[in-house]
Image (tube, rainbow, N blue to C red):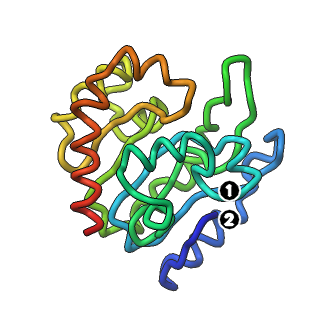
Amino acid sequence: MANSSPPHKSAALIKRVLKCVLCPELPLGPRPVFQFDPRARILIAGQAPGIRVHESGVPFQDASGDRLRNWLGVDRETFYDPKCFAILPMAFCYPGTGSSGDLPPPPRCAETWRQELLQQLPALDLTIIIGRYARDWHLPERTKEPLTETIADWEEFWPDRIVAPHPSPRNNRWLKRNPWFEDDVLPRIKTAVHRSIA
């Protein structure tokens, strides 16, 4: 887990999550990776750690993180300040790799921990929802539509929520096919981020 300095009220919950062994069958074993402080203003709701993040124990410590920080318009110091950003993926441990990339986040992680953690984030004023799995949890009414359609409807959720594709290099083709995301949506995201952490 990256920098975290939660007040004592949340400390017990964080300790429980860090000791979680709900999924002993994971290929590299449980190693929860997230960033949390109840004073955080922005929530990054992602998918699950990749193997590099599993090895480092630092969320978004990979090429996806470099792109995400560029999208948000923040440097590493700001991104890893838990008072600015809470980083809570849909599963906290590396799920392993399948034929087309990393496996989906095991649902039991969010079922067990997510609501309790979110209740400890009273200062949030922006949630950045990354990818289909986070979209399905945070916007269950939109689960039956393509992710691209949800992203394109960004004004419907503005200004407290916004949906983005995963910043993985695997999505380079999607970004080329949908230039409106970088042209129209990213400037709004950067504005909202800087407003929240100013």
Report the front residue among 153 and 143: 153
Mark-to-mark CA distance, 1 and 2: 6 Å
What residue is drawn where x is 83% and y is 39%? 27
Quarter of the image where one finds residue 149 = top left
Q: Quadrant of the N terminus?
A: bottom right
Quadrant in the rendering for residue 21: bottom right
Of residues 85 and 16, the one drawn nearer to the viewer in this rendering: 85
| Quadrant where the image shows the C terminus | bottom left
**In this rendering, would 128 be left or right of 47?**
left
Above or below residue 82? Residue 192 is above
Question: Which element type, helix, strand or loop, lies under badge 2?
Answer: helix
Q: Which residue is mark 1?
A: 32
Answer above or below: position of 96 versus 173. below
- Callout 1 crowding tier (Cα within 10 Å): few <14, some 14–19, many ≥20: many
Q: Which residue position is annotated with label 2?
A: 18
Question: What amino acid is at disc 2?
Answer: Leu
Q: Secondary structure at mark 1?
A: loop
Sequence order check, earlier mark of 1 and 2: 2
The amino acid type found where label 1 is placed reads Pro
Q: Position of residue 162 (x, y in %)?
A: 29, 41
* Position in image of residue 66 (x %, y %): 52, 46
* C-beta proximity under 8 Å, tags 1 and 2: yes
Q: Residue at x 38, y 23 (%)?
A: 147
The spot of residue 76 in percent (x, y) is: 50, 61
Q: Decide: is 172 above or below 155.
A: above
Q: Which mark is residue 53?
A: none
Q: Residue at x 30, y 26 (%)?
A: 150
Residue 45 locus on image (x, y percent): 45, 47
> Where 124 falls versus 54 (above or below)?
below
